[in-house]
Amino acid sequence: MLAAALTSPAANAEAALAPGLAAAAAADAAAAAPAPGRMLLDARGCCDYEVAEWVGDAVLRFLSVAHVLFEEPTARDKQLSLAAEQILRNQSLYERAKEIRLPELALCRPFEVSATLPEMRKAACSLKDQANLVESLLGGLAETARQQALKDGQADPLRRALEAASHFFTAAVLPPRPPAAPPPPPWAEQLRRLNEKMPPPQRRGRQPPPDRQLQQQLQEQAAALCCGLGSELDLHAACPALLLEACRWNERDTFQRLEFEGDAFLQAAVSLELVARYPECDEGELTHLRSCLVKNLHLSRLLTRRFGAALAREFVRDASEAHRRAIESFVAGVDTTSGLSMLEVLTLTREAAAADAAPPPASAPRHDRRGHDYRKPLGDQYEAIVGLVLTALHGDVDRTWAVFRRDFFPPEAEAAEAADAAEAREEVRREVRRQQQQQREQAAKAEVCLQRLFFLSPPPPPPSPPPPPPPPAGPRHT
């Protein structure tokens, strides 16, 4: 309802939003009523606010990352993260919400600080509430556009979802630009031109002489990488320099930018896919499912299954010796024969969490014993390959997701679950709830241990009361 209010012509004129929002609202109103889906739950048209906010958070992150990559072509990884955080933080979203007068729409009446609203209603529209409302609007626009594209038989539902959210993102989320600055290009144009915005591959510090053997190895890895991605992608012709840069995990600027882009894209694509696949799950269950799919453990497994154990080892050849030993042991244990269903992914994640919680052996690498994930280079490599494909395809999000979708949702696992899809989804929900309960119990035990550690020493005795003052001296008698 709030999305419809924000995109209506009256609210558009009052809040000074982009003209594209009013045109989009008019087109939606002229079209037939959307088919019942995940975001429309009852006859009143009320949507699941928590799920809309969850989807909007992932969509907002991807749009922010694409904007930052386009606007900051020479920024390094930490600078990119800080620039994206300036858009994503609650304070920025709250300030933008005030500028487009979201409190009035949320409270359905003019917002006055002291005269007309009681304290309770003013507290209901706090800083975080308004930031969450912006995310829910983005999520509602994206999911509604995706459902409408599927209903119309369109072949690019992901692009339409992100494009619908990008209008509101550009008009109401991005900070205002200086008057003399040109307006930013459309979202799709920014993605198409990301290849031009990538810095030239270069090493930091002093440049060593070129190593012909290393170049030959990278060329062989590039050929194997293209073979693993499919013959329909001509990465050699699209971006040969980026292809060689993404063939081996490193800490150089170009690789980090590709990883930054691929990570944000996977968050948005997997979120929209999960909402469509598991319509009965709430926001907490969807968060757990997405976490299991995009964490380094599963991305490392997908990298090994997609490109083979030998190439996975070559990807991280530049890592330290301790890293390589731990990664080789992990890669050797990955089953590459068949795809994993969602239930199997949850089961393996639970078993890996239990193994990580156990005391590590003395031979474990130091970074593992400090709590770091030694599988991170493999996960970073997979995200960089995703960013490489998205850049090579000139920002075609649907073709990019088609390349990697079968990694996360294998066709053979889908065929096995198709016989009883409702029971398979319910079994996934039961496993998610079981793991969430275990996490809550572990958090409660950790809290108890911290309290015992904090109160291990006896509390200091209370200070003794001060002595009473002496009685006043009476009159002296002679």
Image: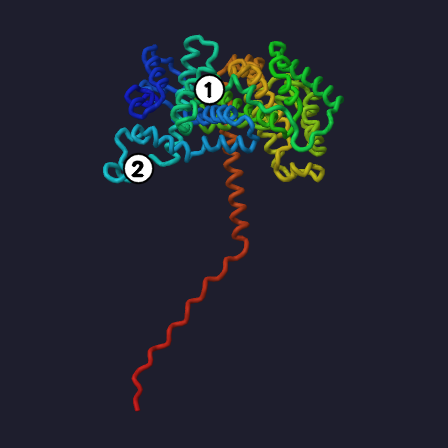
Q: CA distance from mark 1 to mark 2?
A: 35 Å
**In the image: residue 276, left or right of residue 322:** left
In the image, farthest residue toward the bottom: 478
Q: Answer whether labels 1 and 2 touch (C-beta < 8 Å).
A: no
- Where's residue 426, x and y in %? 48, 21
Disc 2 packing (10 Å; few <14; some 14–19; many ≥20): some
Mark 1 falls on what kind of element? helix
Residue located at (34% from left, 30% from top): 99
Q: Is residue 12 visible in this depiction of the protein?
A: yes
Query: Does 268 sit above or below residue 81?
Result: above
User: Which residue is denoted by mark 1 in the rendering?
Assistant: 187
Amino acid at dot 2:
Lys
Q: Nearer the viewer, residue 92 or 415?
A: 92
**In the image: residue 259, left or right of residue 430:** right
Name the image quarter holding residue 161. Answer: top left
Q: Is residue 293 visible in this depiction of the protein?
A: no
User: Which residue is denoted by mark 2 in the rendering?
Assistant: 122
Amino acid at dot 1:
Trp
Residue located at (51% from left, 48% from top): 451
Residue located at (30% from left, 28% from top): 105
Q: Nearer the viewer, mark 1 or mark 2?
A: 1
In the image, farthest residue toward the front: 180
Identify the mark at residue 30; answer none if there is no mark. none
- Where's residue 266, x and y in %? 53, 22
In the image, farthest residue toward the left: 115
Disc 1 packing (10 Å; few <14; some 14–19; many ≥20): many
Query: Does 372 sit above or below residue 215?
Result: below
Q: Earlier in the sequence, mark 1 or mark 2?
A: 2
- Where's residue 239, x and y in %? 61, 16
In the image, farthest residue toward the top: 153
Residue located at (50% from left, 41% from top): 444
Q: Nearer the viewer, residue 330 or 72?
A: 72
